[in-house]
Image (tube, helix red, strand yellow):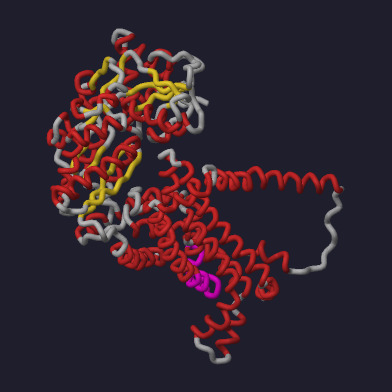
Amino acid sequence: MSDAVLPAIERPRAQPMGESGLVKGLLIGTALLFLTAFLFLPLITVFLEGFRKGADVFFDSFSDPDTMAAVKLTLLVAAIAVPFNALVGIAASWAIAKFNFAGKNLLLTLIDLPFSISPVISGLVYVLLFSAHGWLGPWLIANDIEIIFAVPGIVLATVFVTFPFVARELIPLMQSQGTSEEEAALTLGASGFHTFLRVTLPNIKWALLYGVLLCNARAMGEFGAVSVVSGHIRGLTNTMPLHIEILYNEYNFVAAFAVATLLAGLALLTLVAKSFLEWRYAGELAASHRH
Amino acid sequence: MLIPSRRKLTLGAAALALALSFGPALADKTLLNVSYDPTREFYKEFNEAFAADWKAKKGEVVTINQSHGGSGKQARAVIDGLDADVVTLALAGDIDQIANKTDKLPKDWASKLPHNSAPYTSTIVFLVRKGNPKGIKDWGDLAKEGVAVITPNPKTSGGARWNYLAAWAWAEKAFGGDETKVKQYIADLYRNVPVLDTGARGSTTTFAQRGIGDVFISWENEAFLVQKEFGADNFDIIVPSLSIKAEPPVAVVEGVAKAKGNEEVAKAYLEFLYSPAGQKLAAKHFFRPVDEAAADPADLARFPKLELVSIDTDFGGWAAAQKKHFADGGVFDEIYRPTN
């Protein structure tokens, strides 16, 4: 977040660029070359491969019921995981940034945990917990509750992996904002919830939105953790990333890249939405950052 | 840990409610067939044929869901609770694992259907690039210097275990049973493997799509499929002097099928594999049918005749082969040293 809003802050400073034009050109050229080779070219390849046999074949790929089921499942998982992580993320950041309590650092570390461990392990944890021979397995079977190799398991794994995005955006901002405005509101007689709604939330809304967009992009794209808990039943527990792998493995390269195009398109849309909001509300963003 | 665990519970309940409304609502019966990698195309067509047959006989709509992956990995998922009504895996050892680790399958599952519960067989052949530029003719050529061999990892892939055992059987015959020489040969062969994928389909893509390697040790059905998908003018199939009779077995996971009320349809599904219609489809998708009379003669003509060893008579069955070769600390661990 801080990177994204920095350019909006105008601050007089000494010109540090004493380098010659050649050095500048080389630096910019290297960065551009790197971006082209590692980001732009692969992305173009995805789109080209998807359309290799023409637009008809491309759009036909989406009439397959299994593909549609995968798209629907991915949207469903994101629709549950993102709002949930937004709510819990706000609660956790609020608690960490505005209050002091024992174990605060431990909580911060726990929030970072999903970033630092491999998604495969995030998936395996749930297998160990909920599978037929896992800790809770026998109880789940006795009560006829399906978690692993079914939609709930996929949602759980996605929530786990995408948990830090919102909280990680909010905590630094809320910490830098401090508690003085909230204290003022409380002194003037506002209730706790009212203070949150009218003072805290407006101050964090851009960081929150940014966190939600990142969280959404990852929720739709997660492969590793979901692959472990999915069971790979086509039409039932295949999300879009898993379905892309299946199509690729069945020599259905056009369909695989068509679905990949859709997934990449959703990610690009997320980025465009983010850039648009930043541009449209640049002034407000800078203002909120100055608090 | 307070927050994460509370999160799990509330979310589990919410997601559960959604999942219940998410299942297929139209079908009267839903079967789940958990299978291995190279059977995707075959079961796609077979499932339609069975559903039509069942509809005609019983008037009931049955939907068959498929899950594919490396055979060992799939068995692991069923043990962990993947709700398979039937398993159709690459080798008996993997179904044995399910029977050993759970009570969903009887220990004598293999005796429930004809031919050790294997409705079709296959064997192991070589796929090389067009014109066979490295002159690969038999197993001995795979251990030569400068030949890059593609085969999956025997620890996770069923097909890879058949590959390994076929190579072993050839070497045992070639070196007159001298086990030191046999092990040296196997070690040399695996030294030539640049990429050890986890499943047969991954190896196929490595060889055919990514263009890595000179020779691909492959299921016979997978080799034919590559020729069909990527064009017969790109690859040649080489039949070695000796190979192994691979019997991919099938079984009803009785514990699951009974709980879902699918026992009858699951049994009928596997029996349909043995029917003339099922056998004909198997041959069409490059599996060797057990009932040759049912198959299209043109399909049968594609299968070359070659000397085949058997897992039961030459290796003492899967349990013994698994223990000697593929278990932790077995021969494969002893000889396999990845090189770069």
Residue furthest to the top: B176
Side of B62 where A158 appears, left or right: right
Q: Position of residue A183 (x, y in %)?
A: 58, 84
Residue at the spot 33% in from the left edge and 51% down from the top edge: A127
Residue B103 visible to the viewer: no
Q: Is residue B241 visible?
A: yes
Does residue B31 appear to the left or right of A150 in the view shown? left
Q: Nearer the viewer, residue B190 or A135?
A: B190
Residue extent of the magenta highlight:
A90-106
Q: In the image, residue A189 lies at what x, y percent?
A: 54, 92
A39 relative to B158 in the view: left or right: right
Compared to residue A13, the image places residue B167 above or below, namely above
* Image quadrant in which the N terminus of chain A is located: bottom right
Q: Residue at x 27, y 30 (%)?
A: B283
**Does the magenta run of residues contain A101?**
yes
Position of B96 compared to A281: left or right?
A: left
